[in-house]
């Protein structure tokens, strides 16, 4: 892990916002920007977009997890914030992709 958790988390967070903003500008230019925030939980960080759980980040491993509900992430990781792509490879405008 070449960078600390906070730096990697901020890079991931900014990337998620940029992906959503680019999608919104292309498809829905008249819509208002979403409200984003980071909630720090006991084991994970929850990324929130317009009061919906966007994704979760595990503190220990840096794994990006798709939100299964507001409180619970899905089981399998969709990326890692310490990777070259900062966990954004499988990211869409509404959150991490489904596994196929």
Image (cartoon, rainbow, N blue to C red):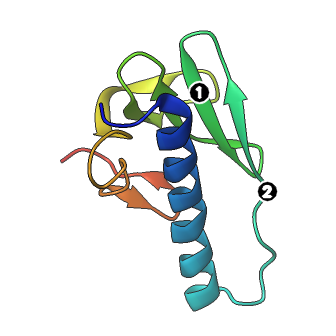
Based on the displayed image, in which of its 4 quarters is residue 26 positioned?
Answer: bottom right
Residue at 68% over, 23% down: 40
Horizontally, residue 36 falls left or right of residue 82, namely right
Mark 1 vs mark 2, CA separation in Å: 17 Å
Asked whether residue 91 is in view, the answer is yes
Residue at 62% over, 21% down: 71
User: How far across and down, in percent of the image, does residue 53 sit?
Assistant: 63, 39
Residue at 39% over, 29% down: 62
Q: Earlier in the sequence, mark 1 or mark 2?
A: 2
User: How far across and down, in percent of the image, does residue 67 sit?
Assistant: 50, 35
In the displayed image of the protein, which residue is found farthest to the left? 100
In the displayed image of the protein, which residue is found farthest to the top? 42
Q: Which residue is mark 1?
A: 45
Find numbered disc 1 in the image and state the secondary structure of the residue it sits on: strand
Horizontally, residue 99 falls left or right of residue 88, namely left
Horizontally, residue 60 falls left or right of residue 24, namely left
Height in image: 12 above or below 29?
A: above
User: How far across and down, in percent of the image, does residue 8 sit?
Assistant: 47, 41
């Amino acid at each position: 892990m070449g960078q600390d958790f906070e730096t990697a988390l901020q890079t991931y967070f900014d990337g998620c916002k940029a992906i959503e903003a680019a999608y919104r500008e292309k498809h829905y230019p008249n819509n208002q920007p979403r409200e984003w925030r980071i909630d720090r939980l006991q084991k994970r960080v929850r990324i929130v977009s317009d009061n919906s759980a966007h994704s979760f980040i595990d503190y220990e491993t840096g794994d990006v997890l798709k939100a299964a509900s507001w409180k619970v992430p899905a089981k399998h990781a969709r990326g890692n914030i310490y990777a070259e792509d900062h966990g954004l490879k499988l990211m869409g405008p509404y959150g991490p992709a489904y596994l196929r």
